[in-house]
Amino acid sequence: MKKKVLLMGKSGSGKTSMRSIIFANYIARDTRRLGATIDVEHSHVRFLGNLVLNLWDCGGQEAFMENYFASQRDNIFRNVEVLIYVFDVESRELDKDMHYYQSCLEAILQNSPEAKIFCLVHKMDLVQEDQRDLIFREREEDLKRLSKPLECTCFRTSIWDETLYRAWSSIVYKLIPNVKELEQSLNQFANIIDADEVLLFERATFLVISHCQRRPHRDVHRFEKVSNIIKQFKLSCSKLAAQFQSMEVRNSNFAAFIDMFTSNTYVMVIMSDPAIPSEATLINIRNARKHFEKLERVSQAQSTIAK
């Protein structure tokens, strides 16, 4: 199942850097050596086995942008599932940014009116910390107003923290065909083993694709932090020619188990009951694996029929 994803925004807004971090295993500091995208760069990213993101990274130089809305209009904006528009929060040409965004919306409305729209207010690390909430809220209000009659979802992002993972997890979540069944099964699994929390990660990107929370937690950014940390650890392992398969982290308050789950996912289980031995949780993960593998096979079969 292919889903066309347009990644757009002015040159220098950070589109290719974020794509490289999420899908090509770059770390933030290495993105400095990436050059500007020339015209449209196509990539096919396999996600969860049967879902292929047909990613169009559109160069943001003025000549290219004008071309997208003129001679290439139908080709660029036809059959789009998702438009991701990236704004540099410190851009000195905000009016021009907004003009290009509106031109995108007009073309989407004409060619792909069902497309989901996401706006990323990027490079938020460059804004003074005490000003970030205010600036983001103002931009979000402007963008939502400009987007009508279409609806847009806005995220603040930076390649230097967990916000990038949060935004892309939310975007990809909207593209997963059987996500409700996944969530239902994850809830049942968490209830059966009395887990505080269970998370499902996509295997290659380590984006969170589903989760179940049964007890409150004060850190609302924990999923993205864990994604970031484990992905970096996994990359460090591969550099040493070692393969990351599983991990257990334990202290006096909880035990966290991260394990390869299906052929396309990792699972993380958080347990705070000290009476439950590690072996019991690991056996439960192993037993649940068969059910989730069956779910994946059914989803893949449905996708094949849909084609």
Image (tube, rainbow, N blue to C red):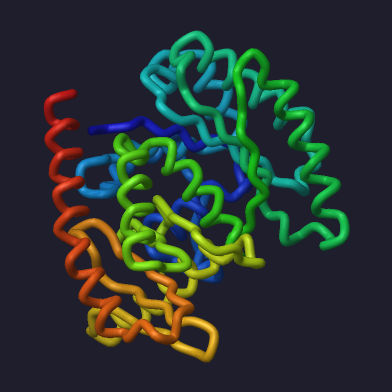
Q: Residue at x 67, y 49 (%)?
A: 156
Residues 91 and 150: in front is 150
Residue 264 sits above or below residue 65 on the image: below
Q: Residue at x 47, y 22 (%)?
A: 115
Give the residue furthest to the top.
110
Left or right of residue 72, residue 186 in this image:
left
Residues 286 and 265: in front is 286
Left or right of residue 141, residue 157 in this image:
left
Give residue 94's position: percent from left, percent from top: 78, 34
Quadrant of image for the N terminus:
top left
Give the residue furthest to the bottom.
252
* Quarter holding residue 99: top right
Residue 238 sits above or below residue 90 on the image: below
* Quarter holding residue 291: bottom left
Left or right of residue 25, residue 148 in this image:
right
Residue 194 sits above or below residue 145 on the image: below
Residue 175 visible to the viewer: yes
Q: Residue at x 37, y 61 (%)?
A: 190
Quadrant of image for the C terminus:
top left
Give residue 261's position: percent from left, percent from top: 24, 64
Give residue 31's position: percent from left, percent from top: 51, 63
Q: Residue at x 28, y 42 (%)?
A: 44
Residue 42 visible to the viewer: no
Disc tally is 0
Give residue 226's position: percent from left, percent from top: 49, 70
Residues 36 and 284: in front is 284
